[in-house]
Amino acid sequence: MTALRSIDVSKVFEDGFTALADINLSVDPGEFVTLLGPSGCGKTTLLKIFAGFYAPTTGRVEQNGADVTSAPPEKRDTAMCFQSYALFPHLTVAENIEFGPKQNRVDRDERLDRLNELLRQVDLERHREKLPNKLSGGQQQRVALARALAMRPSVVLFDEPLSNLDAKLREQVRREIRGLQRKFGFTAIYVTHDQSEALAMSDRVVVMSGGKVEQIGAPEEVYQRPETAFVADFIGSANLLPFDRVDDHVVETPLGRLTVSNRPDPNARFICWRPEDAEFGVSEGGNIVTSDISERAYQGAYTDLHISVAGAPDQRLHWPGGASCVGQSATFRLPPERIRFVRGEIA
Ligand SMILES: Nc1ncnc2c1ncn2[C@@H]1O[C@H](COP(=O)(O)OP(=O)(O)O)[C@@H](O)[C@H]1O
Ligand SMILES: [Mg+2]
């Protein structure tokens, strides 16, 4: 049985704006699914539909197989964890965490058990009597998380919970969230516009654009086998080039005639390769490209090169050596199996 499911869900707001169209998503119990896409693509709207804050304009929402489309938030077994921590400023850490269970008349012993366990889990035992404004951003976010988990929800909906934290803390808290999720076994739907967060945390990623689902897949799938130009470009960086089919395994491109392992499907519009796909120091075996280097940026583990070939003015590749290892041109090989085909438009 699926933990949470949307069937043909769309949302048209009062002003006539279509924020979501035909969203079909099934989430398994205990799965960690992220909704990934640029600002305005409909992530929060979909999360609010799952939480029961918005009714979909068309379609249905199911939780554990039951139709909850018109059930109010308190009748769903879900909890929300927001980016603005939304803690009660006049309540202590402990009171914030106990708030939901108190409202729901969970008995005192059980409440205290949950509180103590959660305080330990999020490492806030020493701060239980503090008010939220005496805590750091990371600690406040942990209180918000503990407060969401105090109700023992089977689904937790996260809306960009880490976006107020600095980069280092973000990485730490995201590991903690994933750790808690494994420990408590809840199903997580996690909204982010940060591709690295999505790749690091998820069992599956739902890539969204303009109110639609572009692709759903494991992190490795959406990165290694993007289906559309949007997905290829939004996750990591991608070189996208038009092509003409010569035969099943040969295409004509601005980089020259290339052998490919995958056959282009009839709807494919572009070839796609990633900066790290280029092989250096190989001069045989076909698919050799010689290009002019227009820019280089040393990144430590590699040097980011911008190269151009007639008809392909700004391609990017990673030179594995140091900054000074290359001259004004770069020769590299594109392995046939690294060349993918994608549908869609270049933004
Ligand atoms: N209440 C509303 N009325 C009209 N348009 C809205 C409303 N809420 C959100 N939108 C619009 O719907 C789109 C999706 O919003 P949202 O789901 O918040 O995007 P995201 O969370 O992906 O940034 C945006 O273009 C936003 O302006
Ligand atoms: Mg949002």
Image: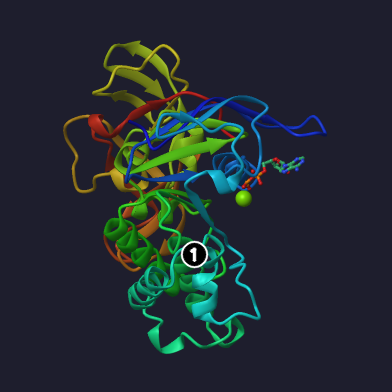
Q: Quadrant of the C terminus?
A: top right
Residue at which label 1 appears: 101
Q: Residue 255: horizontal and vertical position, in percent? A: 39, 31
Q: Is residue 315 visible?
A: no
Any atom of ligand 2 within 8 Å of the CB at mark 1?
A: no
Q: Is residue 55 left or right of residue 281?
A: right
**Residue 257 falls in image quadrant:** top left
* Most distant residue in the right direction: 15
Which residue occupies the foreground of this view, 307 or 90? 90
Where in the figure is residue 274, as x and y percent of width and height? 36, 42
Q: Report helix, strand or loop for mark 1.
A: helix
State whether residue 328 appears in this view: yes
Question: In which quadrant is the N terminus drawn?
Answer: top left
- Give the residue displayed 35% in from the left and 67% down from the top: 176
Identify whether 156 is placed above or below 344: below
Place of residue 86 in the rendered image (x, y in percent of width and height, measured from the top left): 62, 67
Q: Whereabouts is ligand 1, in terms of quadrant? A: top right
Amino acid type indicated by mark 1: Pro
Q: Nearer the viewer, residue 172 or 267?
A: 172
Crowd band around label 1 with a 10 angstrom C-alpha radius: few (<14), some (14–19), many (20+): many
Residue 49 relative to residue 283: left or right: right
- Residue 183 or residue 211, whichever sits in front: 183
Q: Position of residue 331 (x, y in %)?
A: 30, 44
Residue in view at x 57 percent, y 60 percent = 82
Give the residue at x 40% y 34%: 64
Left or right: 100 as drawn, with respect to 17: left
Q: Nearer the viewer, residue 19 or 141?
A: 141
Q: Is residue 174 above or below residue 10?
A: below
- What's the coloring here? rainbow
